[in-house]
Amino acid sequence: MSGKETLLALDLGTTTLAGRLIDRNGRTLAEATVRNPQAALGADIIRRLELALHGEGQRLQELLVEGLEGLLSELLRGAGVNRRSIGAAAAAGNAGICALLRCLPVDSILFPPHRPTEKQGLYLEPSRLGLDLPVPLYLFPLVTGYVGGDLVAFLFAQAPHGDHTLYLDIGTNGELALHSGGRWWTTSVAAGPAFEGGGIGCGMAAATGAVSGVTLEDDRLRLEVIGGGSPRGLCGSGLAETVAAALEGGLVDGHGTIVDPLQVPSNLARYLGDGPGGRCLRLYRDAAVDLCLTQEDLRTFQLAKGAIRAGVDCLLARAGLSADSIAEVAVTGAFGFSLTPRVLKRVAMLPENMIDRVRFAESGVLSGCCRLLLDSAGPEKAQRLADTLHPYPLSGTPAFEKAFLGALDF
């Protein structure tokens, strides 16, 4: 590593790109997020890989680099430094995003056996990517086509790893890891972009104006807005808390259906109305914004939380463990803010007897990148960790399909 004082960490998310600049003492100089511009061509990674297969790979790579350049510019402004001060850089992402960044063939990820063509951690020359960086970019190792470097980075940040510990990186692609008896089980589920405020009519990233929290107070829904002021949309945590509050207030039933206002015996009924797509839960309205959660939005959230819950249930079953035996659950990802045990329990995202052992690890992927950058042996240690992770494919298996159907209700 050079003597330059600024270190750059990047989380290459399907929906959100996140970055952090730190100094060599680990002190955060700036942190920021931007939307991944690739979403304009496809909301999920499968769609993007299909587009790459049909000749759009170069365009997708250019969009990703465009987003990273915008993110880097924002970070540099926030830290008050120039890019020539960067002495080392590391990034982590899922296998699809990493393949698109490098313009690699995507066939082996899209089709069985769903393995990336290259999965070792490595240094990338920025000029070959179109990135304006003064140093090579270290890219975290991958495990499979659907268990990526982002999970490896999160686990790297959490070391040492306790026995019977479950790790969840919740985003567009939910990645799960279970450490038990000195062994790892890992898997992934397609949750969709709802946890990052995507795929929702009123969704947005966790930025100024986003509703990040919702609580039920008597016959009123109290909104917590990032930065104060008027709400402009729901981020992931705001979405989950809205659903939990609506369930508690009887505005949504256990199957996820918005109820008839006449069935609500309190003044909470005033939050129910009609929108362009039918009945909706209206949180706020002014001249500029009509903040409504539609029935379709609720179904999208149900599919996302159902996928996570089914993945947890299946991974525990594969390891021969019960939810009671889990000592700790470390959660990171896209919510923007941590969720209270009350919300996790109410939306049934995790087994109920596991909820009181949940610990939120904010920006887990970025933390793993930073830890690597501060350790001269970081790349070797990250590779050793990745080599111990055993994948357990779930997609399309009868066990997962059965668990998923059983996890949709609240």
Image: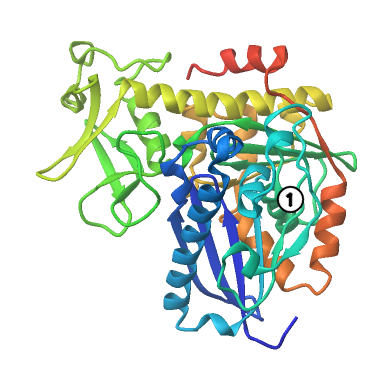
Q: Residue furthest front?
A: 55
Under tag 1, what secondary structure? helix
Q: Quadrant of residue 287?
A: top left
Residue 83 percent coordinates (x, y): 54, 80
Work out which quarter of the rendered image holds the N terminus and state it: bottom right
Residue 70, picture quadrant: bottom left
Q: Residue at x 36, y 55 (%)?
A: 207
Q: Name the residue tied to disc 1.
A: 152
In the rendered view, would you say 111 is above or below 186? above
Q: Position of residue 260 (x, y in %)?
A: 23, 12
Residue 348 visible from this viewpoint: no
Residue 106 in view here: yes
Front residue of 387/371: it is 387
**Location of residue 312 with respect to 263 vertically, above or below:** below
| Rendered location of residue 409, percent (x, y) | 49, 16
Density class for disc 1 (Cα within 10 Å; few <14, some 14-19, many ≥20) is many
Q: Nearer the viewer, residue 107 or 374?
A: 107
Q: In the image, 254: left or right of 320?
A: left
Q: Is residue 375 left or right of residue 110?
A: right
Q: Nearer the viewer, residue 94 or 29?
A: 94
